[in-house]
């Protein structure tokens, strides 16, 4: 708008003073208007300069490095730290802010055991396998619950159900960071100057009476700031390849030409309508992403199906080519068992749970089988995906790209299923109960060699198996009889549903994410809906805080992921869809999968989050020990196996995953079985539901700290210390003495010192801003905020420094984190400094290891540079 158009003329017909011979002739109306315009312009320039220096900060910062929402973020920080007096546009709150102590107490008091119980009962009343009608009902139930708990607009007709990849989906997530209010959108620095100047002119014109003050002020409603943004909830739909069981059988035949089987596996879990009412309505038996087909061959038993186990078979002269391979669960991810068997030439794979892995709590001589007691039921079957997770997660046919509705224009093309490099098997596989495995194992007695429990490389105290009383001797085979495996499945590209909620913070461009997946192989009372029920109570706590007038400094994003069980699909597609936005804005990601599977508190996290989790855990009463709190004894690195994977391994964001896992003496949790039910959880897992309550409290406290601490609670100094321990592990590997690790050692030390300095700087800046005895001036407050935000930017980008270049890890480029990754032949388990470690341990390639050292040096230098630069702002 032309500033001249803002200047109103004086009222026409106003009387001029009478001429006097001693006085100059009166000024004309045009002359008066001209002088007033000049005066207004001069005053506007002065005011504009003052406004610029206040909102842009005059001390030691780089405007070009600030995000489009920086001025909004400055005001958000100031409102959070020092109140609205330092903000040029007064930030009024509907209610006075509540104290930190009250926030903490509310998080501890609000989660209710009966709330978790009721939520879990609803979530587990039917199977909700990804992509099914039951799964959709769960996703939309979560949506409606979050709307109610957070006070978000109700959407009973589900109009906020969008196809991912559409403008509606994009807007639902990013609208807060796309705002152009007050001209601070993506116009750049010059656009901001012009906007500020125009606004200053308008103010001057109003003050000198050149324009009338309109009823609607700067904020649109009679001079008042609009009501704070309400939380919003919606569901996005992606489309992924999924597989479902049609029919399956496992039979033995006297020889390859026989037509009548000598034995047939039951392939069915027993039903207990009284003790476990949902068990009769359980799911079929299959492996997600197993290949369709029928295979016949002799049987070979390969222990746990690790690389070492297949090497032992080769050394003993047992060829698995053309054979059906039977293995135990454990040791490595099930998909890698199938991969190893396929690469060795096997025709099909069978995998069972041996009760030896159940420990004292599952001892069958001391405990009856479920449902009479806490030992494993002989018919229990562990379903699961056999996708090659350590190659890449997500939709197998769209690696690195979001899997949109195929009908949408511009949808990325899908790979053919049989394309080279697609991360799903080319041979059929099936899970078995140990009851079905016993006849197969007995058929191998005395054939080949006997697997020994105390063989080299096995954990201390490990036993090969616990089926000796049933006559199993654990021989390798091959069998005399022929085993036939029939696996008929349906493959289809089908919709999956991610549900989200946003709690807007005072700062829109810093976001804390917490998530849990809602799909299950059967009823999911432990995996994952113990986590869903705990998150439900955390959301209740956040909603209670909002009603009390609390507003987080940073925005909070809640996510209910779908299709995690098949291969972390919902979260991975989201991460691939919004990768740039997430890397620009996310502070940290908190994941809860199995919240309650036992009594042992287990934490896996980026080293920078370890201290935060230890601090908040100590505030939470222990669910099983009166007078004690949860204590963190160890925080292990993250590999894969749950929805944090894309955030950490692909996007370089600090992550944590925690819950109460099964201990050796706890009742056997029937993982991925029909007995993963409300009946089991309410009787054996957590009868009081105090464990669910405890995890809800930990999650709530960690979320509030991440969302409200002035200095982002990421201890990068602890991360630097961990780097030194990672390098010590490398030194223990074969041929490590051929490498020069001195530069990495030196850089790790420098990173540690720079981290300590930047954390101290952040604490000082926050203290200065919060000083009530000698508060900073408006000008100084803005400058301090900019410096504090520079510190926080460096802290949250620390993890991203490990992404290195775009090439990722050798042979599995989807994974980009050079500091930690799922082991190539582990699947879930973490390998630190993976490129370097696996070049030595798996490939015996010293030259490649030297290349990896150089890549790490470059990454370490980048991390150090980011920390040092933040100290100069």
Image (cartoon, rainbow, N blue to C red):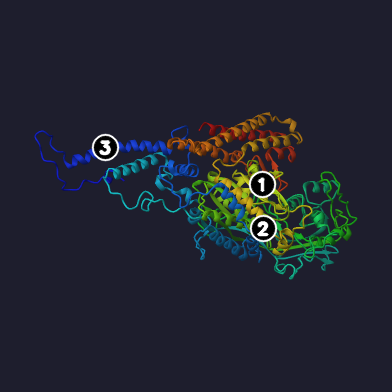
- Asked where in the image residue 349 lies, by quadrant, the reply is bottom right
Query: Which of pointers 1 and 2 indicates the residue nearer the eye?
Result: 1
Q: Which residue has dot 2 on it?
A: 530
Whichever of labels 1 and 3 marks the residue nearer the N terminus, that label is 3
Seen from the viewer's position, the closer of residues 277 and 616 is: 616
Residue 539: x %, y % from top left: 58, 56
- Asked where in the image residue 849 lies, by quadrant, the reply is top right
Q: Residue at x 18, y 42 (%)?
A: 29
Measured in 3D between alpha carbons, the distance from the residue under mark 1 to the one under mark 3, in whole angstroms, is 63 Å
Residue 280: x %, y % from top left: 72, 69
Report whether 333 appears left or right of 147.
right
Q: Secondary structure at mark 3?
A: helix
Q: Residue furthest right?
A: 446
Seen from the viewer's position, the closer of residues 268 and 276 is: 276
Whichever of labels 2 and 3 marks the residue nearer the N terminus, that label is 3
From where the camera sits, is residue 401 visible?
no
Q: Residue at x 71, y 50 (%)?
A: 627
Establish if 798 lies above or below 422: above
Mark 2 Cα-neighbour bin, 10 Å: few <14, some 14–19, many ≥20: many
Q: Secondary structure at mark 1?
A: loop
Q: Which residue has dot 1 on it?
A: 618
Establish if 634 lies above or below 122: above
Q: How many marks?
A: 3
């Amino acid at each position: 708008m032309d500033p001249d158009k803002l200047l109103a003329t004086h009222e026409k017909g106003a009387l001029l003073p009478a001429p006097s011979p001693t006085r100059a002739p009166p000024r004309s109306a045009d002359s008066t208007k001209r002088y007033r315009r000049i005066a207004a312009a001069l005053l506007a320039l002065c005011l504009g300069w003052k406004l610029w220096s206040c909102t842009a900060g005059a001390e030691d910062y780089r405007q070009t490095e600030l995000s489009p929402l920086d001025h909004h973020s400055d005001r958000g920080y100031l409102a959070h730290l020092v109140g609205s007096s330092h903000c040029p546009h007064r930030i009024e709150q509907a209610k006075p802010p509540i104290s930190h102590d009250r926030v903490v107490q509310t998080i501890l008091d609000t989660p209710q055991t009966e709330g978790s119980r009721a939520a879990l009962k609803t979530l587990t009343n039917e199977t909700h396998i990804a992509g099914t009608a039951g799964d959709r009902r769960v996703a939309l139930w979560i949506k409606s619950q979050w709307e109610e708990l957070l006070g978000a607009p109700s959407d009973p007709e589900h109009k906020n159900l969008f196809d991912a990849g559409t403008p509606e989906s994009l807007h639902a997530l990013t609208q807060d960071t796309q705002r152009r209010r007050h001209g601070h959108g993506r116009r750049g620095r010059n656009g901001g100057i012009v906007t500020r100047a125009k606004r200053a002119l308008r103010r001057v014109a109003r003050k000198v009476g050149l324009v009338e003050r309109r009823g609607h002020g700067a904020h649109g409603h009679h001079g008042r700031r609009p009501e704070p943004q309400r939380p919003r909830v919606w569901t996005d739909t992606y489309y992924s390849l999924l597989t479902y069981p049609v029919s399956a059988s496992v039979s033995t035949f006297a020889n390859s030409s026989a037509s009548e089987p000598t034995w047939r596996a039951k392939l069915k879990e027993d039903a207990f309508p009284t003790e476990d009412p949902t068990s009769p309505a359980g799911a079929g038996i299959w492996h997600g992403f197993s290949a369709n087909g029928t295979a016949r061959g002799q049987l070979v038993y390969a222990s746990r199906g690790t690389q070492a186990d297949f090497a032992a078979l080769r050394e003993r002269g047992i060829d698995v080519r053309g054979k059906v391979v039977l293995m135990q669960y454990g040791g490595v991810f099930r998909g890698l068992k199938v991969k190893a068997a396929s690469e060795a030439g096997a025709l099909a794979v069978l995998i069972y749970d041996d009760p030896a892995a159940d420990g004292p709590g599952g001892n069958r001589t001391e405990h009856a089988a479920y449902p009479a007691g806490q030992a494993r039921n002989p018919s229990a079957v562990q379903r699961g995906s056999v996708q090659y997770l350590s190659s890449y997660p997500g939709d197998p046919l769209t690696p690195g790209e979001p899997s949109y509705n195929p009908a949408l224009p511009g949808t990325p093309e899908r790979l053919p299923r049989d394309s080279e490099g697609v991360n799903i098997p080319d041979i059929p596989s099936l899970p078995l109960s140990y009851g079905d495995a016993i006849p197969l194992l007995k058929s191998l007695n005395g054939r080949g060699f006997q697997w020994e429990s105390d063989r080299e490389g096995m954990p201390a105290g490990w036993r090969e198996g616990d089926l000796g009383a049933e006559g199993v001797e654990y021989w390798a085979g091959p069998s005399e009889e022929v085993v036939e495996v029939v696996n008929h499945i349906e493959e289809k590209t089908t919709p999956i549903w991610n549900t989200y909620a946003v709690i807007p913070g005072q700062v829109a461009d810093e976001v804390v994410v917490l998530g849990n997946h809602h799909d299950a192989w059967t009823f999911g009372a432990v995996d994952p809906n113990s986590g869903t029920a705990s998150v439900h109570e955390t959301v209740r706590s956040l909603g209670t805080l909002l009603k009390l007038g609390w507003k987080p400094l940073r925005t909070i994003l809640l996510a209910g992921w779908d299709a995690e069980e098949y291969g972390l699909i919902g979260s991975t597609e989201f991460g691939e869809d919004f990768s740039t936005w997430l890397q620009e804005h996310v502070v940290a990601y908190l994941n809860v999968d199995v919240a309650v599977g036992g009594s042992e508190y287990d934490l896996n996290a980026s080293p920078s989050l370890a201290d935060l989790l230890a601090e908040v855990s100590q505030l939470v009463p222990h669910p099983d020990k009166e007078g004690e709190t949860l204590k963190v004894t160890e925080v292990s690195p993250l590999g894969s196996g749950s929805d944090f994977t894309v955030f950490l391994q692909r996007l370089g964001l600090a992550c944590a995953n925690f819950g109460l896992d099964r201990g050796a003496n706890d009742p056997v949790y029937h993982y991925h079985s029909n007995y993963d039910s409300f009946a089991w959880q309410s009787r054996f897992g957590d009868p009081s539901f105090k464990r669910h309550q405890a995890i809800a409290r930990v999650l709530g406290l960690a979320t509030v700290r991440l969302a409200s601490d002035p200095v982002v609670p990421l201890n990068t100094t602890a991360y630097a210390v961990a780097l030194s321990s990672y390098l010590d592990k490398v030194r223990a590997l074969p041929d490590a003495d051929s490498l020069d690790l001195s530069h990495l050692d030196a850089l790790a030390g420098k990173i540690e010192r720079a981290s300590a300095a930047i954390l101290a700087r952040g604490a000082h800046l926050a203290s200065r801003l919060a000083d009530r005895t000698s508060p900073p001036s408006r000008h100084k407050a803005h400058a301090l905020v900019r410096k504090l935000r520079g510190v926080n930017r460096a802290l949250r980008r620390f993890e991203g420094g490990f992404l290195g270049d775009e090439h990722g890890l050798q042979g599995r480029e989807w994974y980009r984190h050079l500091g930690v990754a799922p082991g190539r032949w582990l699947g879930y388990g973490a390998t630190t400094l993976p490129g370097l470690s696996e070049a030595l341990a798996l490939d015996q390639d010293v030259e490649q290891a030297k290349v990896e050292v150089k890549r790490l040096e470059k990454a370490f230098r980048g991390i150090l540079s980011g920390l040092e630069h933040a100290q100069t702002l």
